Image: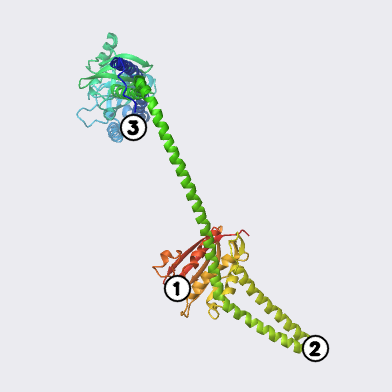
Amino acid sequence: MGKRADKVPGRMKRWGAFGFAVLMVLGLGFWVVGLYARHVALSQLSGQSHADASLKVALLRAVLERPRSLPLLLSEDQQVVDALTGRDAGAVERLNDKLERLVTGTSASVLYVINARGVAIASSNWREPLSFVGADYGFREYFRGAVQFGAAEHFALGNVSKRPGLYISRRVGPAAAPLGVVVVKAEFDQLEADWREATRFAFVTDSAGVVLISSVPAWRFMTLAPLPKADMAAIRDSLQFGDAPLQPLPINHVEALGPDAWLVHSVVPGDRAGEYLHLALDVPSTPWKLSYLVPTEPAISSAAREWRLLAFFIALPVFSIFGVYLWRRQAALARIYRAEADRQELERRVDERTRDLSQAHDRLQDEMAGRRETEARLQVVQQELVQANRLAILGQVAAGVAHEINQPLATIRAYAENALVFLERQQQQPVQDNLGAIARLTARIGTITDELKAFARKGRTAPEPVLLVEAIDGAIVLLRSRFSGHLDALSVDEIPAGLAVQANRIRLEQVLINLFQNALEALEGQGDGYVKVSALPQGNEVAITVRDNGPGIAPEILPNLFHPFNTSKDKGLGLGLVISKDIIADYGGRMDVDSSPAGTCFTIFLQRVPQ
């Protein structure tokens, strides 16, 4: 390794200047980001608060619409007309009861009827100590407005109940000769309670800017701005708000954000002063406006934290790059001293690694060549095992086949001798019959020998369409002699015509002979034994099933049934099923087994040949 580099002159001064620059940039950036975060927060808060305020306006309209229908209906009611005209002495009493029932079933506070002189003659609270019956309301705006215009709405403080509410009135009778006025008073205590929140405040003002409804009870009958003396005197004279001081709200406008949005500074109950977003929305069907105050500090603080944190994480990589660049500049001299030594060390290691890789490559090539040679030998051994299994089966059936051939040969000789006798007698028809029988027996011998020759062939062949009927029949022909007298236990279900699979007939016959032979051997000593063979198409495959009712395969053998040299037979090698499964696998198929004490079922799945 090279020698250690000396310290770079002025190193501490450069790092100090770098740190000062970082602090200055961060400070300025945080200030700019804070301004932007404030703008974003106010914009988002304004949108959200506008939606909340719109919901409150909708709720207020719903509360207003419910009592408005009562005066309209009662102004046309005959009982009201009878009570105002005095035609029926009991009309007023019945009207009191009716008004009392109507108020009980609605959200109205009180419902009463005033005659043409402005005196209440019937009221829903006629039973209460502070009943409106007999009170003079001729000076009220809602009375005069209804008489003059037919209908009126007026928010005021009750002169009897001293409770604020909206008076909705309707004239009874024609404009030229009014009989009186029907009035319903709606109070908003429940609405104010529903609006009440810990940090957000809502209130409704009339056209003069006086607070009528408020989630802050202390703000009721305060004003948005100081009222002119003339307006103040008129309100005092009308007793609309009683002796309320009508002082301005503790709200100071700071900045306009739009036609209906401002930033304000307010002191709310509990001496909590702060900055608020003030929204003002018109209340449809009234001259009122709904004001909504939302604190801005939580939203702005949260947005500022998020944006400043984002700015910090953006600036951090930049400062890191500059710091790394400064560090690299200071380390340049040391790297120059070490460069040559590192280069030489690297070349040495590259040479060593190259030699190691070359040696590893040579070893890998040798291993691959040995593996290919082993695989080739394995394939040869596998083919030899398949052929040995085939020849073993051939040897087992050879004696029986010889017997099968001897019988037709003896019969052919007898038919030939008889034919000579018939020729001497010049009997043509028996001669022809004997010759036909000789031909059929010769064909039978040819079939047996063809099966033996084909079965003895060696080698793997490419897959081709094989009719299952022919493969099963060929396997049974080769087994008929060995299991003479027992082959009646083997039955083949009807196989669909033309059903074929992708395989090789000879190799498939070898598999079937193995399965048939194992099944028949399992039935030895069992009088009611049977072996059933079936073949059914299943989608793109054909399932060939060989089922017997023998004692089943031993549990200790079943898990390793398809492993070499695993057998329960005294003279068996345990290779038949292994080879059979490999043959089926060569043609893209598979072999399954299911065994129990009630019997064993082997199922072969091979690719189906489309018809």
Query: Which circle, 2 or 1, is nearer the viewer?
Result: 1
**Of the pair 477 and 592, the residue shown nearer to us:** 477
73, above or below 139, in the image: below
Q: Are marks 1 and 3 in contact (CB under 8 Å)?
A: no
**Residue at (63% x, 64% y) in the render:** 498
Expressed as whole percent of the image width and height from the top left, the position of residue 570 reads 44, 74
Q: Amino acid at mark 3?
A: Gln
Mark 2 vs mark 3: in front: 2
Q: Residues within 10 Å of mark 3 (few under 14, many from 20)?
A: some
Kind of residue at disc 2: Gln
Q: Which residue is at a point 49% across and 47% down the rendered structure image? A: 365
The secondary element bearing badge 3 is classed as helix
Nearer to us in this view, 309 or 473: 473
Residue position marked by numbered label 2 in the rendering: 426
Mark 2 or 1 closer to N-term? 2
**Image: 287 above or below 584:** above
Mark 2 and mark 1 residues within 8 Å of each other at the beta carbon: no
Q: Residue beneath label 1, please?
A: 569
What numbered label is drawn on residue 79? Answer: 3
The quadrant of the picture occupied by the C terminus is: bottom right
Residue visible at 52% across and 65% down?
A: 385
Residue 517's mark? none
Amino acid marked by disc 1: Lys
Quick check: can you spot residue 118? Answer: no
Position of 20 relative to 64 (above/below): above
Tell which circle, 2 or 3, labels the residue nearer the N-terminal end.
3
Q: CA distance from mark 1 to mark 3?
A: 114 Å
Element type at mark 2: loop
